[in-house]
Amino acid sequence: MHIRTYLIAIGLLSSCWLTFPASSYGQDSVAVLYDIIPVKTFVGSRATLQNSQLNSTPATGYLPALTGRIPGFYTQQTSGFRQINTAVNYNVDAFLGNRPITGAGVPSENTEYNISLRGQTPIVVIDGIQRDIFSIDPENIESITLLKDALSTIALGQRSSRGILLISTKTPRAGKTNISFSAQAGLQEPLFLPKPLPSYQYAYLLNEALTNSGYQPAYQESEFDAFRLGNTPYSYPNTDWYKNVLRAHAPLMRYNLGANGGGKTAQYAIALNYTEQKGLFNEDPGVAYNTNASLKRYLLSTNVHINITERFSLGLQIMGRIQDGNEPGVGMNNLLQALKKTPNGSYPNKNPNGSWSSTNYFKDNLQAMATHSGYRQDNMKDVMANVDLGYDLNNVVKGLSIKATTNVAVQSLTGIVRERKEPTFRMVIGPSGDTTYTSIANAVAQKNDFNTVFNARFWFGQIGINYDRTWQKHHLNGSIMGDQRRTLFNYDLPAVATNLTGKLFYDYLGKYLIQGALNTSGYNRYRPGYQYGVFYALGVGWNVSEEPFLKDQSAWLNLLKLRATYGKTGNGVDNSGYYDFRSTFRSTDGRIGSGVYSAGTSRSELRGFWENTTLPNVRTWEGAHKLNIGLDASFFENKLSLVSDIYYDRYFDLLQTRGKSIELIGISYPFENIGRTTMKGAEFQLTYQQQKGELSYFVTGNFSIEQSKITFFDEQQQHYPWMQVTGLPIGVRMGYIAEGLFQTSEEAAKSASTDGYEPQPGDIKYRDLNNDGIINQFDQTPISNKKPRLYYGLTVGFCYKGFSVSALFQGVENRQIYWGDGTIQSGFQGFGGYEQAYTPVLSRWTPETAMSATYPRVTIGNTYNYATSSFWLRSGDYLRLKNVQIAYDFPKQLANLLKLQGLQLFANAINVATWASFKGQDPEVAIGAYPIQRVVNLGITIHL
């Protein structure tokens, strides 16, 4: 069963958007990579969403619309706003679709979501061209298909193991010209903002932390009341920095204009989109420039299909995009981190004389950072042009055809940094009551830096020949296809990837299916002699419902198909330069210990070169053997349908350094293809739909379970077996096992301790795994959850007389949050120990709360309690009401009276409600990042 959305006319008065299985309404083909094949003979694993399902989500891109709708696909939102880029830190492989780059490289323009398809980051293919473009308005997309198995992705060769996110933009349709226009406006509201302590509580706890650490208190008892009453706000402020820096709402606007039509000879589709998103930072009306975060995007797409002759067709497509980003000059992330760490009582917004206030520990004023620090901008421009040619050679050889595609694309990103800094002062009241102002931070003049972050040029060419023929009960389809993709990034040498793929599909009466594919794939950056590899995939299927013994059961059984695929796939991950297989040397930077030898009594510097790293034996792509077994079924005239898959993927030749190697030679060891892991799981999707008169309704649920395992990791020989990661899930967290809090001095004295620190009552008690009386690295062990991860989604909807309502619930189980990844809200750590504290610290340990405390005692700058341990693990399970839409389609007669073909009013929302096991923060976006938002949106769609 494959899902497709249709516009169904109910009577003569109204229409509704409904979701039905493709088989029940005649969809007989499915888009796969570089091809379209019959649904009946498809034996792989896929899931498809159509345009109307994407448009119900108010967002600037399409990724939020996929969340919870597709089994096996998971998105985690890590930021509520796109991050701009003004620095030259891109790597060419970011554009080739290799694995996400760590370190300085940026993998793609997606900075808001982590995406995973069966544990891997899928490759994005847009209209047959591999491009990591995520900021496309959903209105411009006709469908999105996730291809999950080896046979469906094998044509990518060295990059075929990760699955494919296949996007098809709007295509031309023959007929009378149809013009549509939609306008949407929404409000963004930040969610799960942390709750900082008011200044009087912070002052009280700061005294407690200082006392616990052996220091004198910072405040007298009378000063607590001064903070609490607010009578002297300049000396004892209680500044709500979150309110000062962030606004309660921000607008989001989207406008789309489209047209399509044409005759028998030529058809066209044109789409124009404008999107504008404002950020949540407050602005100063007196500042002439924009300091808020913002996004503006213009997108133009044209698609023309021409039947030059009955056998010869031509397709032309051009897509252009201009995208402008803006954020405060100090940088959005820097501002948010400062906001997280600055106490409410640190300083007032401004001093009595109107100058910006600050302290010795918090030198930069938050309000000045938000509204007077200048601005940063980036500007993305790209153009992509496709030419598709097809020729039917049926008159030469029956069933024979050829096709060719070429694509040329240019993309550039430039950045402007106009950062500045306001001077800040600390107000000092002398013994006689006189007021002076001490300079804390000096003014910094506004920069005017311009960077060309990157210029990239892409070329893709493909040619293929296809043979499709049916003889009585036999059907045969075969193809041979070759392609090459070239990327020229800045001033680097071209990166060239090539593929040659052959496929052969056979079926007997559409019942018994046998399919196979063979691919040879190359990449010019590998060592000569090791640049090419061979990959293969096989598939079988059985349409059981076509058997004679089930033909009489068609009243209740409409479809029953068993399918399976297996293949050897690859993942090209070389994200370095051309010559990784050769020794490279680094020149000195002039520092002692960096290639400089000081000689003689005068210590003259002798400069030189030194080797970067040892050479790998052979460094190539990673590989995977992938098995997928599936079942498709539908019952009772397709009212009830089921799709299920189980998979087992074995990854090998993974790049890693040898952990058993020691660096006695003084240089780094290379990455080598030595690692092995596995990923296994199961996916289910069940749909029920019904139509009774003018009422139509449906419910669709999906469920996925996945489990990873490290089968070989060349780790160092560990002293104890509990320190090993081999055999554990990927990404397991190592740390100490916490056994609660010490309650008495006697208990702490009798327990194991760390070198140089004696635990006190209220400190975390760590388990001494080797019983040597010392807590150290030998007591660290896996502490995170080893259970398989569960993902699920539920979509419900109904339509009645033009009114339609739908809702999407999405959730995760067996997930954990580590409350130490920059999110521990204890305070009193950074900034000399004066960092802001938040409400969870109120449950700290004290002698009075010893039995009920859920937080360790507060201290100044004490790192003992914040070592990685199970104490800070929290459940990351959650359920979201992710999306709701209400729409009304006006009756056709009424629309016609207005000289319209159709008129729809709608309202939708995203992140409507969340139920999470852990209440301390959003289950996806960490504290200190741009907050996740609820968006409530109103819109209108007009068809002319």
Image (cartoon, rainbow, N blue to C red):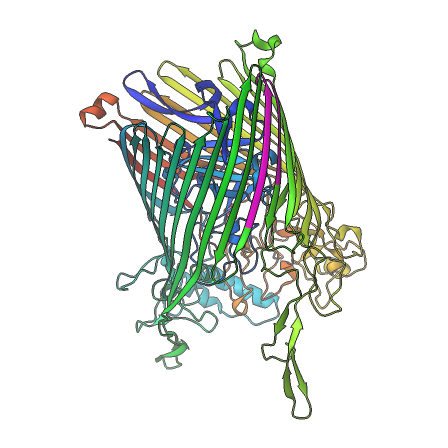
Residue 126 x %, y %? 45, 41
Q: Is residue 504 magenta?
A: yes
Relative to 436, is 475 above or below?
above
Q: Residue at x 63, y 85 (%)?
A: 605
Residue 505 visible in this rendered orientation of the protein: yes
Q: Which residues are magenta?
A: 497-519
Residue 356 x %, y %? 35, 70
Quarter of the figure with the C terminus: top left
Residue 804 x %, y %? 36, 26
- Quick one: 90 or 239, which is closer to the camera? 90
Residue 330 visible in this rendered orientation of the protein: no
- Residue furthest bottom in the image: 601
The quarter of the displayed image where residue 273 is located: top left
Q: Residue at x 42, y 69 (%)?
A: 364
Disc tally is 0
Q: Residue at x 65, y 45 (%)?
A: 533
Q: Is residue 355 magenta?
A: no
- Quick one: 456 or 556, which is closer to the camera? 456
The quarter of the displayed image where residue 546 is located: top right
Residue 691 x %, y %? 41, 16
**Majority secondary structure in the magenta region:** strand
- Quick one: 720 or 113, which is closer to the camera? 113
